[in-house]
Amino acid sequence: MRTTDQSNRRTGLVVFAVALLVTLGWALATDHVWEDFYITFRSSKNLVTGHGLVFIPGERLHTFTSPLGVLLPAAASALTGTHSDPAAIWVFRVWGGAAFAWAAVLLWTLARRFQYGAWAAMALVAFMVLDAKSIDFTTNGMETGFLLLFIAYSLWAMFVGAGRRWLQLGLAWGALMWTRPDSFLYIGLLSAGVFFFNDPARTGLTRWQWLKVFVLAGLVCTAIYLPWFLWSWSYYGTPVPHTITAKGGDYMAAKNAAGVFKTLIDLPINVWNGRTSLEGAFLPSYFQIGGWPAAAVTAARAVAVFLAFQWVLPWWRTEVRVASFTFCGMHVYLSYFPYFPFPWYMPGTTLLAAVTLGGMLAQLGSWAERGRAAGAPAWPRVVQLSVVLVVLAVLGGESWLTWQMRREMAFEQIYSATGNRRRVGEWLKENARPGDTVFMEPLGHIGYFSGLKTYDYPGLSSMEMVSAVRALGAHGGNLAEFLCPDWMVLRPWEYADMHKDVYRMFGDGFEYQLVKEFNRMPEVEQLEVYGRKYIEFDSHLLVFKRQVPKRYLLDATVKDPYAGLGLAVFNIGGQAMHQVHATGIVSFKVPANATHFRVTYGMPESTYTGDPATDGVKFVILWTNGLKTQRLLVRTLEPHDAPDDRGAQEFETELPPHGDKAGIILLTLPSQADAMDWSCWGLPEFK
């Protein structure tokens, strides 16, 4: 027994060492730092330097998702004296790599507990250890290594741990919640799977005993996570991370149980047209952008849908059905709720796929061994050979994808992350003024290295952006026109879309002028690498600077709120009105005590009496308190054809109850053409 225990410990150390070396080797080869790490790390650095756990000092906004994902980098930064970000990143990489390696050891222990054969045990561990996204997100600054560790710990507590199982499981659950608050999905699915598919001979507990374990474990989990829940609520005003709100809190609220059930039923069909997250468990990050072999995508879909429904087959062992059930359930969630299956969600599901496939191979091997012992002539050898071939084929394909993604991420770091986004951030830091704002989608490197106030889409760092999206929708041109950032960083296609719909924003004499171009595209186009389209995505960035005064949140209580904007003034029906050419946006702060609003609007006579003449303008008045938006007016004026639409128009209304965050947005939109769309607004009046 002592010799066996020593052998098991030595094997466990080997598994740990190999897994750790895999992660550190990847980090050395790629030096890849994920975009989202710098979003979180800005808050980490602010915490260590005394500015609070915030993205922008003074703004208590919950701009990260994982408590461990922000606190551990803060600790790493503190250990390095806050003087070396690369050193802090490497400290965090080592911690994450150790967690990843310990997860591999726990999976190996699970295989030993159930006496898996050598090939099945090796496959179970290797499937996880060689997964490219699991390795990458463990070392690129995300919390993935810890997520994998605590999922593996949950499986270990369920199937291996015997003494005080409720305590072990509660500790695992609490750690999962500290790693990612949405881990309650893993907790619920694993628990439901064990309850539904329980085999007392394999788990040692009846269903009713499991219920007692779950209740006690839930209490332990609550005790562990509750302090963070209460603190974040008191500090930020809500326990819900702002990242969840920005990425679709309202969108997800519209989902329902019927939609979940339909997603489950349709999963085996929809996977083939790319409408699920399933294949993402086995393919490189953002494979959807293109540049990967179609055969790899097809194979990934086939394997994923096969593993996702093994839980319906009653002959598989408990751990197989539990892992398959949870894998399937997580992908129902990822296919239905988020608006995109982001790759950092996938490693946890890939671990479950490894447990499913490893357990299936082990059970097939066990059946073959029993057949050989019973004297069966041929089929046991066929089954054993099939197990070996499946292991070699899956590991071979996985290793190829991992090697290719390693090359992709190394080049992405050189030409896109460090070579472009970071350079943009550093250039803005040198050329922008303190207090300037910058509008962009890729927040991480640009936001961290510029240090500016950021209006990122969809608003991970900015309540203003979230409020703007709620009020105006997701159109980038309208959002930029409304928020009036000092700088914009756009990809060429983003610029083209904005310029097409709000063309007066760009060029000499208009709102924004191109001042700097960062282009690595010629170099990227020479690369012979799979997934090159992902590298191209941020290899060409354009920087624009605002040339005219802002029209965002003007003060209606001053004598002339339009003063200094350079807007043309027209006399319409005896009233002075300021021209805001459609598409155009002006917004005003609503005084906290205001209950009534009045404004005039209209179009000058010259817009409909000459040639060409306007074909009409839509005037829209929106009220918003930052959380919800109400349309007060939507009216199209067609003064060329409708005499009643000529001259001064008036709108007044009572305002909804509000606090000091409310605003009025005056929006004008063109009809088919924007010729002579000289839409005008009078002075707003609040009472």
Image (cartoon, rainbow, N blue to C red):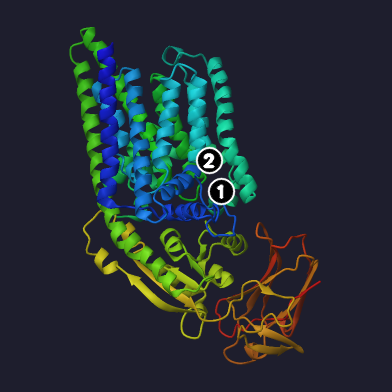
* Label annotation for residue 106: none
Q: Is residue 433 left or right of residue 580?
A: left
Where residue 459 appears, x then y in whole percent? 53, 59
- Please state which of residues 601 and 122 is positioned toward the viewer in this rendering: 122
Answer with mark 2 or mark 1, whichever residue precedes in sequence.
2
The kind of residue on which mark 2 rests is Pro
Task: Tell me if residue 467 can be seen.
Answer: yes
Whether 552 is drawn above or below 528: the answer is: below
The kind of residue on which mark 1 rests is Pro
- Please state which of residues 92 and 382 is positioned toward the viewer in this rendering: 92
Where residue 578 appears, x then y in whole percent? 67, 84
Labelled pair 2, 1 in contact (Cβ < 8 Å):
yes
Look at 51% across and 82% down and name the residue there: 510
Number of other residues with Cα within 10 Å of mark 1, as a class: few under 14, some 14 to 19, many 20 or more = many
Whether 118 is drawn above or below 43: the answer is: above
| Viewport quadrant of the C terminus | bottom right
Whether 522 is drawn above or below 193: the answer is: below
- Please state which of residues 253 and 91 is positioned toward the viewer in this rendering: 91
Residue picked out by circle 2: 181
